[in-house]
Image: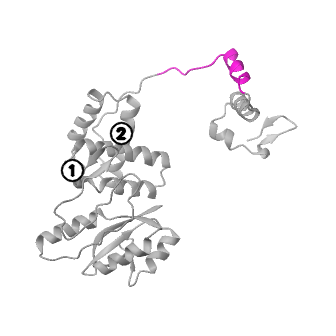
Amino acid sequence: METIILKPLDHNQQENIAMYFPNIGMLNKAARKIKNARWSQTNKCWYVLLNKEKHSDIIKAFKGLAKIEQTELHDYLVAKNKKKTAAPTLIRNNIKQPATVSKIIVAERSVSKKEIIDYKGGKIYPVNAHVLPAMHQTLILKSYSASTIKTYTNEVGIFLRTIKHHSADSFSTKRLKDYLQYCSTTLGLTENTLHSRINALKFYYEQVLKKEKLFWEIPRPKKSIQLPKVLSKEEMIRLIRSIDNVKHKTMIMLAYACGLRVSEITGLKISDLDEDRRVLVN
């Protein structure tokens, strides 16, 4: 399920609710059904006036089609409520947030007590509640694989749990170095895990926050050199003979004989076989 990100938008000298989501037909169709919803070519988003009624219309329009993330809109209304005695409020809804976060922070009239997000046995403080949804959306828009999205959000989620109430967006290069040193010396993370964490943080700060030079001064751990584990011919024969399933045995023998990856084996078609020459043609 896709994610709709709601943000405040000052456009045409009016306060609006902006709706950001991937360019998908069913989502665009749902947005068009919202009364008085308009497309902003400048801001590349759909928008409506900021009020309780329009917010309800958005929730109804995308119900069952997408998840709603509205942290930035929530924070905007909180700040506005501090300046004025009355302000538009949002209605609590049952739409779930992206799978990376277990709760949605929604704005209410009494917004002095913000929720702390439970995340995989730890807590993410409200100051960083926007990080994972923003990163999740950017990863999707850049067409990253599901495994990379899962890895990156997990690594950044661990980072947010560690820094607690400190704002991730304000971290300097030095503070990031201190954190990575803590991961290496105190947590004892392996080189591969450190590389994954650096890559995830680098993506957030450079791709989401656009701080392109932040990681230039952060060194990467040297990868340890490991010799590949190679089975002898006798070991391979014993392995193949131990397989009873004909299909599985054929796959193992073909992979070993042709040096194919698992994805290449599972993707083979009959047209890839030259029966006369008894070879693979692709």
- Res 201 seen here: no
Does dot 2 land on a helix, a strand or a loop? helix
Please name whichever residue, 61 or 207, is drawn nearer the observer in this view of the structure.
61
Q: Secondary structure at mark 1?
A: loop
> Measured from the top left, where is residue 127 in percent x and y?
22, 54
Q: Is residue 241 left or right of residue 176?
A: right
**Residue at point 34%, 39% (across, down):** 198
Locate the C terminus and report the quarter of the image it occupies. top right
Give, as a three-letter code, the residue at label 2: Arg
**Magenta-colored span:** 226-243
Quarter of the rendering containing residue 66: bottom left
Circles 2, 1 touching at the beta carbon (< 8 Å) = no
**What's the mark number on residue 197?**
2
Disc 1 residue type?
A: Ser
Residue closest to the eye, 123 or 6 = 123
Question: Label 1: how many residues lie within 10 Å, few (<14), some (14-19) or many (20+)?
Answer: some
**Residue 280, above or below 150:** above
Report the side of 23 relative to 168 (left or right): right
Find the distance from the CA under tag 2 to the CA under tag 1: 18 Å
The x and y percentages for residue 152 are: 40, 45
Say whether disc 2 or disc 1 marks the residue closer to the N-terminus. Answer: 1
- From the image, tell me which residue sits under label 1: 167
Picture coordinates of residue 196 (x, y %)?
A: 39, 38
Q: How far across and how far down the image is residue 189, in percent?
A: 34, 30
Which image quadrant for residue 38?
bottom left
**Residue drawn at 35 percent across, 76 percent down:** 56
In magenta segment, residue 8? no
